[in-house]
Image (cartoon, grey):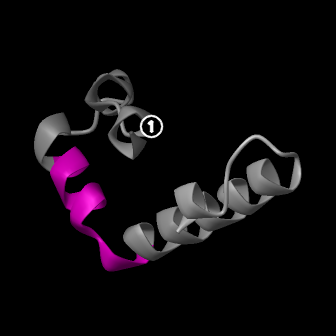
Amino acid sequence: TWKEFFNPEVYKDADLPDAYALRREVLANQAVEARRKTLSTRCGRTLYKLGLLTQESIQ
């Protein structure tokens, strides 16, 4: 899932306070959500064109 890309341990390593709260805030951000959807759509289309996914699986 996309949550794996927002690892609170990275925030801790960067000495950012309250890493888990920061992660929740980032995951709830509408701009971040829109970007994830865009990236997922592009990846799905590419995998479909390569014959690795069906049309139904990317909808």
The residue lying toward the viewer, choosing from 52 and 28, is 52
**Looking at numbered disc 1 in the image, what kind of residue is underneath it?**
Phe
Q: Residue at x 86, y 56 (%)?
A: 49
Instruction: Look at the image and give the residue range highlighted in magenta.
Output: 22-31
Q: Residues within 10 Å of mark 1 (few under 14, many from 20)?
A: few
Furthest toward the right, the residue is 50
The residue lying toward the viewer, choosing from 5 and 1, is 1
Q: Is residue 5 left or right of residue 38?
A: left
Kind of element beneath mark 1? helix
Q: Is residue 55 visible?
A: yes
- Give yes or no for residue 28 being in the magenta stretch: yes
Up-down: is 18 above or below 9? below
Question: Which picture quadrant has residue 29?
Answer: bottom left
- Give yes or no for residue 46 being in the magenta stretch: no
The residue lying toward the viewer, choosing from 53 and 13, is 53
Q: Is residue 18 visible?
A: no
Figure label count: 1
Percent coordinates x, y for residue 46 in the rendering: 80, 55
Up-down: is 39 above or below 14? below
Percent coordinates x, y for residue 15 in the rendering: 30, 30
- Quadrant of the drawing holding the N terminus: top left
Q: Is residue 6 left or right of residue 23?
A: right
Q: Which residue is mark 1?
A: 5
Q: Residue at x 50, y 68 (%)?
A: 37
Main SS, magenta residues: helix
Q: Residue at x 36, y 21 (%)?
A: 13
Q: Residue at x 77, y 54 (%)?
A: 48
Q: Is residue 27 left or right of residue 46?
A: left
Up-down: is 44 above or below 23? below
Percent coordinates x, y for residue 58 in the rendering: 58, 61
